[in-house]
Image: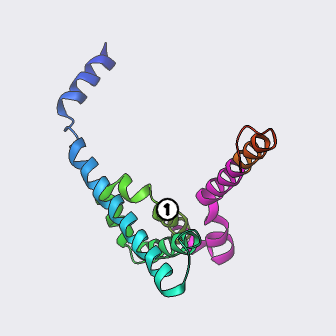
Amino acid sequence: MKEERYQQIEQQITPKAPVAFNMLKAFLVGGSICAVGQAISYFYIIFFNFTEKTAGNPTVATLIFIAMLLTGFGLYRRLGQFAGAGSAVPVTGFGNAVISAAIEHKTEGFVLGVGGNMFKLAGSVILFGVVSAFAVALIKTILVSLGVISW
């Protein structure tokens, strides 16, 4: 009885989250990050003679590098507080997560602090990304060899 009453009181006094406004902010910030990524991709295509296919890797690396710089200067945290998932979902969120762990543990030293903790989150992302890519490639190879799909 007390728990039900507590939940009723909590629902009455908890302010309602502005879901639509938060979604709009996340959409605009995430879209802006993607637009910057597209501009960087075009930069590599125009000035370094990359193709659309080969410009992807340096574009992703550049976005991660920019996110790490912004995190180091404390600006990405503000962006994350404003945009929520809009700043966390693009690849820049990955860069932010890696460097945030490194900054948080820098007092423990470069080897045990920064090096040991930098890849706590990133390690699992990399691991499951590689395993998923391997599984998809294996399935595709089997389907191609069976003639179900063409390469």
The verdict on residue 116 being magenta is: yes
Name the residue: 33% across, 19% down. Answer: 3
Which residue is at the far bottom? 47
Which residue is at the far right? 145
Position in image of residue 110 (x %, y %):
64, 77
Nearest the eye: 76 or 103: 76
The verdict on residue 58 being magenta is: no
Position in image of residue 50 (x %, y %):
56, 79
Element carrying mark 1: helix
When asked about the image quadrant of residue 1, the answer is: top left
Count of residue discs: 1
When asked about the image quadrant of residue 8, the answer is: top left
Name the residue: 67% across, 66% down. Answer: 116
Position in image of residue 146 (x %, y %):
80, 38
Q: Which color scheme is applied? A: rainbow
Amino acid type of the residue tagged 1 in the rendering: Val
Nearest the eye: 26 or 140: 140
Nearest the eye: 120 or 79: 79
Name the residue: 44% across, 81% down. Answer: 43
24 horizontally vs 93: left or right: left
129 horizontally vs 51: left or right: right
The residue carrying pointer 1 sits among few (fewer than 14), some (14 to 19) or many (20 or more) residues within 10 Å by Cα, namely some
Name above or below for residue 12 compared with residue 87: above
- Main SS type for the magenta part? helix
Position in image of residue 145 (x %, y %):
81, 43
Q: Which residue is mark 1?
A: 91
Magenta stretch in the rendered image: 104-133
